[in-house]
DNA sequence: TGTACATCAGTGAACGCGCGTTCACTGATGTAC
DNA sequence: TGTACATCAGTGAACGCGCGTTCACTGATGTAC
């Protein structure tokens, strides 16, 4: 590979390994977001002051405008990052267990969801919480997307279990006609492998997990020892599994 | 009753119906909090600007200092109010059903929890969410109290079911030794009527409900028709009931 | 390989703004005799 | 019942502050020939 790239290569947006400057820029971008996150954590808030970030980084505030057009753009980037990070974290957790170990994969994914939220409640709240002050979310943007993606992850696991013949009847069998119609429409992509009741169960199980995770991340379980919370979470995962009709994974 | 109160009456802090001025003051206090809430709702935020409240009420900002020492005091009041309001709302829902109709009481209380949150996500987030920007919560204050109170409400219902002989075995029977010890200690007040497994189930059921409620209140179920959400919630209540080992209430 | 030019990160001064809060005041409402 | 005084809600002017943002600049890094 030559040191000089051709015009064609540039036009195609091809490789051309980043120079020192570009790498520095990328690093600074990351540092800004990381610093913002640290500040949020430090003050237990979801608010960010541009000035504070600069100060914490040893920069003057105007320098940040080289990287983000304004405060909103930074927040949007952080929200997007959080989505991606949560997604990859869940996927990694899933892949950390052997493909045949469906129960293990389920448990690991649930645990990752919990750990991720507990590790940084601010990002969790950025995704699932009430909007940030002064920040106007992009039109119908990633906000509801959160639901979709989290669901997709769960749906994949359930589908795998179904195909592995490890999926029994969901805990709640009753599904209304309206919900059935809706689910059938939604489930086309899964080629009818998943029925309406199981689809409903996915939402129920997800809610159950999310409830625990959200209460814990927001400090509502502070009165319990961490060990006890672990036990409780294990039980909550059991509940989710039973709701879905999975073979006992724990 | 005479128009004049005695010094003794005043000292004892007795009745003495509030005069016009006092009534006006109380009304203004309420109006301030209500306006703050309306503004929060309007801009989909948990932030409040003192100036905005005054403007919305047709007052000058300094006037508010007759009622609240500063912004924090207003927020604290709003948090406290939210607690009380949620509490009474749940209690009212419970009492709206006959004492013998334990299933009905359970369902009604769950539904009230949901409705309350959906009706004002801001207050819900004030109680259960991440702290408000710039607002430093009172020491170890009501924040974790939320857990306790919500639990107390649920515990009451479960206890009633237990005493009514309508409480079966909880869905998840396994309880770790550590959790058993903890629960036993916590449950002294219930005179051993409730076992550790049921105590654990209470937390699990609450989490499950809370998850749905929180996802819905934060708009994560926006992609579902309201009717479908209703159906889904009904199923979620079923899940909670089964987790607790209640006779099928729905 | 060296030189001339272009790009770009970061600075420092400056701005406008709006917010929280204070203060001395006015006028209405309530209280004591 | 009337008068004198006390209380208190609300005003308007003023303050300090810190934040977001702009602008013209400097100096370092990268690029073309």
Image (spheres, coloured by chain):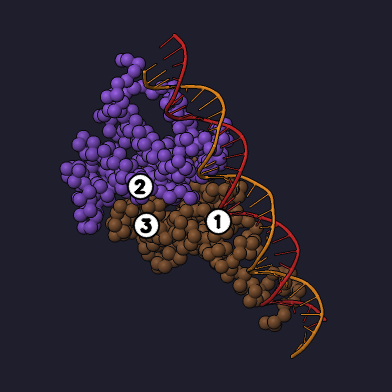
Chain colours: A brown, B purple, C orange, D red
Q: Which mark is residue A147?
A: none
Image coordinates for residue B16, horizontal then vertical, percent? 34, 22
Nearer the camera: disc 3 or disc 2: 2
Residue labelled with disc 3? A166
**In which quadrant will I find the C terminus of chain B?**
top left
| Residue A70 in the image: above or below residue B249 | below
Question: In whole angstroms, how far apart are the C-alphas of marks 1 and 3?
Answer: 50 Å
Find disc 1 in the rendering and name its residue.
Answer: A49
Identify the residue at image location x=61%, y=72%: A24
* Mark pair 2, 1: CA separation: 26 Å
Q: Are marks 3 and 2 on the same chain?
A: no
In this rendering, the answer to whether B199 lies above or below A27 is: above
The reply to whether dot 2 and dot 1 touch (C-beta < 8 Å) is no
Which mark is on residue B141?
2
Depicted B138 relative to depicted B118: above or below: below
Name the chain letter of the residue that bears numbered label 3: A
């Amino acid at each position: 590979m030559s040191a000089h790239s051709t015009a064609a290569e540039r036009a195609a947006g091809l490789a051309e390994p980043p120079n020192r400057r570009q790498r520095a820029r990328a690093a600074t971008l990351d540092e800004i977001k990381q610093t913002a996150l640290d500040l949020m954590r430090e003050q237990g808030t979801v608010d960010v002051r541009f000035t504070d970030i600069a100060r914490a980084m040893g920069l003057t505030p105007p320098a940040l405008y080289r990287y983000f057009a304004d405060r909103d753009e930074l927040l949007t980037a952080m929200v997007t990052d959080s989505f991606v990070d949560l997604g990859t974290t869940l996927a990694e957790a899933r892949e950390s267990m052997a493909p045949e170990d469906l129960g293990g994969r389920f448990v690991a994914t649930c645990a990752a969801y919990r750990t991720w939220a507990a590790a940084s409640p601010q990002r969790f709240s950025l995704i699932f919480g009430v909007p940030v002050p002064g920040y106007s979310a992009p039109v119908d943007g990633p906000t509801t997307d959160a639901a979709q993606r989290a669901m997709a992850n769960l749906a994949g696991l359930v589908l795998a279990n179904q195909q592995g013949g490890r999926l029994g009847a969901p805990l709640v069998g009753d599904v209304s006609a309206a919900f059935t119609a809706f689910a059938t429409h939604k489930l086309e992509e899964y080629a009818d492998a998943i029925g309406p009741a199981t689809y409903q169960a996915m939402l129920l199980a997800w809610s159950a997990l999310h409830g625990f995770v959200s209460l814990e991340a927001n400090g509502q379980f502070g009165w319990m020892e961490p060990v006890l919370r672990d036990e409780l979470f294990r039980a909550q995962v059991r509940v989710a599994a039973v709701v879905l009709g999975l073979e006992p994974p724990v």
